[in-house]
Amino acid sequence: MTKKEKLILFVLAAAQFTHIVDFMIMMPLGPQLMRIFKISPQQFSLIVASYTFSAGIFGFLGAFIIDRFDRKTAFIFTYIGFTLGTLACGLATSYQFLLAARILAGAFGGILGALVLSIISDIIPAERRASAMGIVMTAFSAASVLGVPIGLWLANLYTWNAPFLFLAAFTTIIIASIFKIIPSLTAHLQSKATRPKPMEVITNITNDKNALRALLMMSLLIFGQFSIIPFLSPYMVYNVGFKESQLPFIYLCGGIGTIFTMPLIGRLADKYGRLKIFGYAVFLSAIPILTITNLGSIPVYFALILTTLFMILVGGRIVPATTMVTSTVHPQNRGSFMSINSSIQQLSSGTAAFFAGLVIVKNADGSLQHYNWIGFFAVAAGFFSLYVAQKLRSADGKKM
């Protein structure tokens, strides 16, 4: 990988980092927000869900136009919109204001993720693309290790607004970096005859069984893991015996683990094949999923080993899976397709959390019941996604 490619990937990873932190930091701020705004848990859940559903809806709408612009121009416009949404969150003085700000941030965040993947696919050759995906996806690890703890520290030191104001200030540096480092990308614009009209974007996908399989595979993966993640912290506290002050260690240990393993999984996928590595990750991830969702009271250090393995293996599945998905479409349609893919992932994660909430029951002592059911479902969804992945083909008809 060239020095220029690494620099571009660093900027893309930094943009992803801010987007992920903006989403993740809201959940641990729940106690402060409910106290300050005097809102119920249901109202707080709407703040969290509003970002996800807004990202899904606007990501879908963005698919109609995203391939009609220079990737760099679209990226700058989208990222500035995301910055304004984040700033609005920091300036919110009421529940209604904050809710509107989350919708704004989610609207641009939903398109942002698809653009990052499209830029990687346009710049990095297919034989090295999984490695590039692994590098950019370490943004999630960095968000867990640095973003969330620093954000919570700022919120405790000042007020809940501080993480968003700090994040908005940081994004201005990234905007300058995008202008300077990201090149103009217009190759997908050259073949105007093959670029679909807005409504053809949908029909092209619905008429393409391969594209539908790619979307189904990612939906199953996201639905399975996000049915577990929202209830991981409460389960660790009420069923396993964690103190609330120990919860950040879950993200810290998991984040550190994935920083090293995400790029490694990407390199392995490039060397041995995306489908093969994806298959290993799916099978191995079933172990921590089933173990965690059936835990009783155990020592904290042992639980942290399991949660770290969970984040490494469940997160690791996404690297080869995403690489396979980007290979199923031609470059001139990739932005639109990845935007729809991102939209479906956002909607899948929101729906998964809602589904898990319907299944899990809170006992009188606060412990959670039926979390193991969710674990069985998540494993089944992973194996089904592997079955679908085996049927995928690249845009030129080759096996993955």
Image: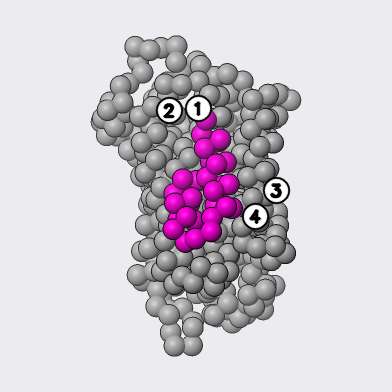
Secondary element under disc 1, as helix, strand or loop, is helix
On residue 260, which mark appears?
A: 3
**Residue sitting at x 43%, y 28%:** 66
Q: Is residue 249 above or below residue 12?
A: below
Distance between the alpha carbons at the discs numbered 3 and 1: 31 Å
Magenta region, mostly helix, strand or loop? Answer: helix
The amino acid at mark 1 is Ala
Look at the picture and state if 186 lies above or below 335: above
Crowding around mark 1 (Cα neighbors within 10 Å: few <14, some 14 to 19, many 20+) is: some
The answer to whether residue 376 is visible is: no
In the image: residue 253, left or right of residue 120: right
Residue beneath disc 2: 66
In the rendered structure, which amino acid carries the disc numbered 2?
Answer: Ile
Residue displayed at 39% across by 50% down: 53
Q: Which residue is mark 1?
A: 74
Q: Which residue is mark 4?
A: 163
Q: Position of residue 212 (x, y in %)?
A: 32, 38
Residue 351, compared with residue 245, is above or below; it is above
| First of labels 3, 1 by sequence position | 1
Mark toward the viewer: 2 or 3: 2
Distance Cα–Cα, label 4 vs label 1: 26 Å
Instruction: Classify mark 3: residues with Cα within 10 Å, few (<14), some (14-19) or many (20+).
Output: some
Disc 4 marks a residue whose amino acid type is Pro
Q: Earlier in the sequence, mark 2 or mark 3?
A: 2
Q: Do the CB atoms of the residues marked 1 and 2 lie less than 8 Å apart?
A: yes
